[in-house]
Image (cartoon, rainbow, N blue to C red):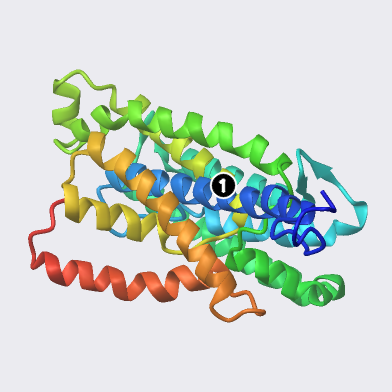
Amino acid sequence: WNALPFADVDPWWRPTDSQILIGIRLPRVIGAAAVGVALSTAGVLFQGLLRNPLADPFVIGSSGGAALGAAAGSLLLSLNIAFLGFGIVPLLGFVGSFVTVWIVYILSRHHGRTSISGLILAGFALGSVAGALNALLVILSDQLQIRFMQTISWILGGVSVNGWAPIASVVPLVVVGVVAGFLLTVRLDALALGERGATRVGIDVERTKLAVIATASLLTALAVSLSGLVAFVGLLVPHAVRLIIGPNNRLLLPAAALAGGSFLIMADLLARTLLAPIEVPVGIFTAIVGSPVFVLLLRRARGSYDF
């Protein structure tokens, strides 16, 4: 080898490059795709269930619960707890998100029925309470004030995946959640007829509500565990895809999942590189970029939007 011309020149591809690509970059790309897929799928499910164009994966209080869990996790950082590659902050963020949604679901139940308006109102109320408790923890805890920026950076969203362990834990569950969501799309389309109309065509409305809430909440909590609270993806992507292909959920859900994964990969890439060496939290980037794009899409639709 040394006898070859230019053998003393460093090769363009070094072993450290492989470590960076396979150990750092690739898990981050897959993590961003998984978060985008999970949030977009959850957005489609919640919008279809609630029949509300403003519904997103955090509409029933999961964001407040996740933030409260993250704040509690910051208080316990000294314990060095980790599980399946996740630290205590994302773990308790996952738990806070999921538990909050199920408390909201229980509160919205009345005489064996789940009220859609009750879900939205209970989610708003409980999310507000969780947000207030989070602020109170920060004010009262000197330890949290010291770690405030770390907690805030997680809440604002960022796909900083450490190795393959979190990916191996979350991605299979995201795939299961997306498949479960796709199997629910026929029932979601039936719910567009109203609860009475859906019952007439043989749909068990209450079981459908429970299945949709469980699936969408799991996907949201999984996304939260990987990236914190990434804004606007679960609202923007389903709307944008719906404007292109229409409201049929059997087509909308897989298309939105694909678009959401692609969108968040690009958003994370731009958030990392545009202001390098400063890395903008991807949640801030998606909100700044997504809002005007969403408005432009709605203007181009010229009132022809179907929900």
Q: Residues within 10 Å of mark 1 (few under 14, many from 20)?
A: some
In the image, 24 versus 237, the foreground residue is 24
Residue at 19% in and 67% down: 298
187 vs 55, left or right, is: left
Residue furthest to the top? 202
Please tell me whether residue 146 is drawn above or below residue 69 in the rendered image: below
- Apparent side of residue 126 relative to residue 67 in the rendered image (left or right): left
Residue drawn at x 75%, y 51% as measured from the top left = 19
Q: Left or right of 258: which side holds 148?
A: right
- Residue 41 appears in which quarter of the rendering? top left
Residue 22 drawn at (x, y percent):
68, 47
Residue 162 visible in the shown view: yes
- List x then y, in percent, for residue 168: 66, 36
**Vertical placement of residue 38 versus 132, above or below:** above
Along the viewing direction, whichever of 85 and 44 lies nearer the viewer = 85
- Residue holding disc 1: 30
- Which quadrant would residue 13 be assigned to in this image? bottom right
Q: How many marks?
A: 1
Q: Secondary structure at mark 1?
A: helix
Amino acid at pointer 1: Ile
Could one spot residue 111 in this view of the protein? no
Q: Position of residue 136 (x, y in %)?
A: 71, 71
Residue drawn at x 58%, y 62% is: 129
